Image: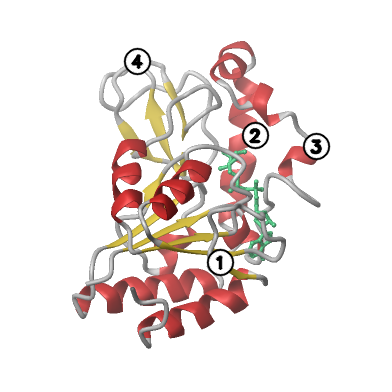
Amino acid sequence: MTDLVILTGAGISAESGLATFRGEGGLWEDVDLRALCSAEGLAAQPRKVHAFYDARRAQLREVAPNPAHAALAQLQERWTSEARGAFTLATMNGDDLHERAGSRDVRHLHGTLFAALCAECGNRVGWEGELPVREDCPACDAPALRPDVVLFGETPRHRHALEALATKADIFIAIGTSASVHPAARLLGLARANGAVTIEVNPAPTGAADILHVLEGPASEEVPRLVRDLLAGAHAV
Ligand code: APR
């Protein structure tokens, strides 16, 4: 049995047309996200924060999954139906491109753009359009719906579960992430420290010391190739 853990970042959605955060054309170029997309920023200027996420949510309807998303959905289907081992897909992306490509049980470490969260009762409700400030929660009626994203200063989701999975992974694959924020950077190190084969897919390799195999190229080319290799038994431990 070979347990797979896959972590994706903004880079896997770049070829679908969604901006990454860092690097050329990244979202960080125009906006100081650390200030805006923080718990303090939401409290101080809610309209600006809601508008930032409204714009990103609207963009989701203009883009589609690319071959990398599709290849990961195929890998999950084959890995699980052939009982090859555990399969975990975690993403730091708020988009729904993995789900639209057919991936199931995707763990969104940084929340999702396609839902709203009640700051009062914790209820989560799917959300498509603009999310007004002080929108009433359908469960508790409090005017407390906010974007269902993890803001700077808030705790990433599924953190402990993913750290446990990373320590047990036989193969850990990081796709399209600069590994510049935790827990992403930490998961790679945990996996490597516990003997996993670590693979990175990135046209601009991060140079992380814990990477065994670097596939230096765009996800839409490298991920389908990697999936073919994995299904053929390559990198098996
Ligand atoms: N294929 C694969 N990787 C790519 C591609 C591509 N076509 N294009 C760019 N990349 C790589 C870049 O080289 C970079 O290393 O994707 C990475 C994107 O890095 P970031 O923009 O830092 O995105 P990410 O690592 O997901 O950021 C993590 O930081 O700002 C917070 O919450 C935000 O979830 C985000 C987190």
Determine which residue is flagged by label 4: 142
Marks 2 and 3: in contact by CB < 8 Å? no
Where disc 3 sits, the SS reads: loop
Crowding at label 2, few (<14), some or many (≥20) Cα neighbours within 10 Å? some
Eye-nearest disc, 1 or 4 = 1
The local secondary structure at tag 4 comes to: loop
For label 1, the crowd category at 10 Å Cα-Cα, with few meaning under 14, some 14 to 19 and many 20 or more, is some
Q: Work out whether mark 1 precedes mark 3 in sequence or the reverse, and give the earlier one.
A: 3
> Is 188 displayed left or right of 22 in the figure?
left
| Between discs 1 and 4, the one toward the N terminus | 1
Amino acid at the residue labelled 4: Ala
Q: Residue at x 29, y 42 (%)?
A: 161
Q: Give the CA distance from mark 3 to mark 2.
A: 12 Å
Q: Residue 92 at what x, y percent from top left?
A: 50, 46
Which residue was labeled with disc 3?
A: 30
Q: Nearer the viewer, mark 4 or mark 2?
A: 2
Q: How far, Cα to Cα, is label 4 from label 2?
A: 23 Å
